[in-house]
Amino acid sequence: MSSSVPNPTRGPSANVPTTTPTSGPASSTPTSGPASSTPTSGPASSTPTSGPASSTPTSGPASSTPTSGPASSTPTSGPASSTPTSGPASASASARPADSDSLLMVRSVDLLKSRDGPNRREHHTDSYFSNNLIVRRGQTFQMWIELSRPFNRRSDNLQLQLSSVVTTGIRISVPLVDVLEDNGWEMKIVEQKDNRVRVSVNTLASASIGRYMITVVSFSPKGKLLFPCAPNDLFLLFNPWCEDDSVYLSNEAERKEYVLNSMGRIYYGTEKQIGARTWNYAQFEQDVLEACLFLMGRGRVALTEWRDPVIVSRMISALVNSNDDQGVLMGNWSDNYAGGTTPTAWSGSGDILKQYYKSGGKPVKFAQCWVYAGVTNSVLRCLGIPTRCVTNFSSAHDTDLSLTTDIYIDEKMELIKDKTNDSVWNFHVWNESWMARPDLPVGYGGWQVVDATPQEPSQGSYRCGPTPVSAVRNGQVDLKFDTPFVFAEVNSDRIYWQKKPNGSFSQVSVEKNTIGQRISTKAVGSEERIDITHLYKYPEGSEEERIAVERASRFGSKPTLYPLPTDNDVSIEIVMVGEGPRIGGDAKLSIVLKNKGSKQRTASLLYEVLVMYYTGVLKATVKKDQINVDLKPLETKTIPWTLLYKEYMNHLVDQGALMLTVTGRVNQTKQILATQFNFRLRTPDLIITPLEGAVVGKELTVKITFQNPLSQVLKNVLFRIEGLGMQSVRKIQYGDVEKLATVTLMEKFVPTVSGSQKLLASMDCRLLTQVHGFADIVVKAK
């Protein structure tokens, strides 16, 4: 699209180029000033400017932006300018001198920015729902420039000037050269037709990303002209396809997955009951790129640092939460979501980011870890950093930097709740981003943990990462950033401490293989889950894994001792059959004790089942009791355990999460038995069924079915639907759903994009959350 009329609020004030006459050949240093419609040539003008001429072009916000009014034609009392400007901006074209044909004027600029054009296709930005020129750094793009006369290579010259839009601080000059060289800002004429030239522009592979205003500067023996291309700005992104970019990723299938895929899977639940939900990252939707750059502009980071994905990802981990910088999302781990959206109701990031952007930066309510991770994934993919969502099951939250998860019990073997500050989340979702780490020793580039969920402050702000996954695996917690915290999340030992009569505590039991289980992410190119636990730690119990734990513990806040009883012949385990209980039914588990010795053993067990938030924060005790067990030599005994629906139905919180704690003592040896088991009550899926074939531009009817699994009425049910190329979320206020009733919705859509699409739906109400579903729909072209 041609740009012949600059935006008067974004650049020089007139709608024609500014002229700066010279007495010799074309100058290589452009100057700024308000736009003039009356170019001059020859000697200096008799109408001086209001101050000395600047040798650096000014454009962009703040004080560097010229005013939008006409240039003054009245001399001021200041010193005479050595670079005078011409007459008022409102002067007509008929006022041009007769010899103006000798000037080289820019008539229009075509940035070749169409979504299906070569620039957008070659830069892998054709999916962005935007009419702007969006390119990736370290790669050339092309543009046409229409001039007032044919370009003379001997006496004329051209130059581009780029200045940052989001904030001041960066101005780039792009010279015209005969031969383009790699890794530099340059441009070359590759085609000339009459008054038009096509130039190829090379960008720096380490340039700061962001939004830039473009000004074309033309030079001729008679003067210099500035032609602002506003409002047609340049959006510059990271480039995983460029070997010189620090986010370079060599595998094309992985680039398609971790940069270009706008749909993903986020895992939740427990290690034995892994649930999955589809998430619409929406990084290409209208206004999302603008929202991401708006968000970055609110960070306390100089624009010159926007070139570094290490700094950018760390900044985004702080900005996605609102704890200390009015970021995107406000967290809420209570069971009261009045005034906002229940975290489980979200199924994509687009609605969140656009709401934040259009409100001018008002935090969106509410989020928990998977929402923070989904939005972080969207922002970083949108900016060009390869990123994926990762779920850690049995994820520890170490509050005292001990690098252990400490559980305190009293003399009666009961949990001391007010002293047990460390918690184990059923699951925790964070992100991994791919980048080089030149700030660390060799070998620590690659996947980096980036976590926007506000758990503990890091250097004064709620943020986490980027943390090299390889450093976590090796226990090298002295490497930045936040490696001790991430190490404890995935590989800390769970230590049970018992209170002694004198008030002190002693270690009575250690569980070495319960934290950091089945670490999961979506597979490349499919909907399958893959286990990446091996990237975070060596096999549990191996010599390498124990060395990593001991190496890390040297940096902890407590001495790490692992005493074991002399007679350790009884083991205890909690077992769940199949996929586990469903919400609305009874929960059935088994407690399994094994006597591995040749002598009879008896044990007294105390069990307690608690309702908790998925973060491991306990809400209430549902049931507790004691069990006495006799074990013959080498006997394995299975004790059935049942929690009735009526016992838990009035206690559940948003994730249907429960924790069974069993502690006890072997009477003969005084061996302490202790274990915890987290489980969830599985929720029903929404069933989405297209009733006919999908065709672009043709109405499509989709049936959405849901059955209430509870013997209770669901109040104020809300359905949310997105995907299928829609640019906004469709919300359906359904009302109440009777107990055990089935709901059927018939919704109509008109697909706008052909190819394989996803339609997502979620249901939310006070009594039942984490209900969602999706359908794969192939949309045919007309």
Image (cartoon, rainbow, N blue to C red):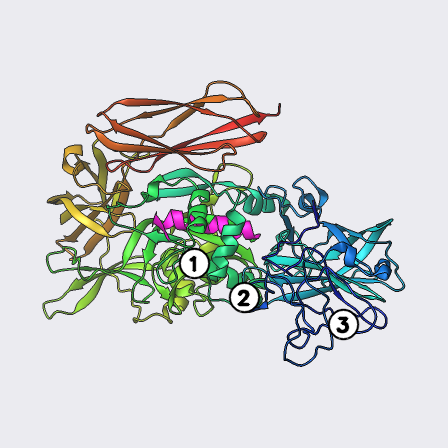
Q: What quarter of the picture does the C terminus occupy?
A: top right
Whole-number angstrom distance, CA of label 2 to CA of label 3: 29 Å
Residue at 49%, 48% (x, y): give it. 378
> Is 111 or 502 nearer to us in this picture?
111
Residue at label 1?
319
Position of 710 with respect to 193 (left or right) is left
Please rate how many residues cluster around mark 1, counting C-alpha atoms within 10 Å: few if below 14, some from 14 to 19, many from 20: many
Give the label on residue 451, or none. Answer: none
Amino acid at dot 1: Leu
Please rate how many residues cluster around mark 2, counting C-alpha atoms within 10 Å: few if below 14, some from 14 to 19, many from 20: few
> Is 501 or 308 nearer to us in this picture?
308
Amino acid at dot 2: Ala
Whole-number angstrom distance, CA of label 2 to CA of label 1: 23 Å
Residue at 61%, 60% (x, y): give it. 246
Residue at label 2?
62
Amino acid at dot 3: Ser
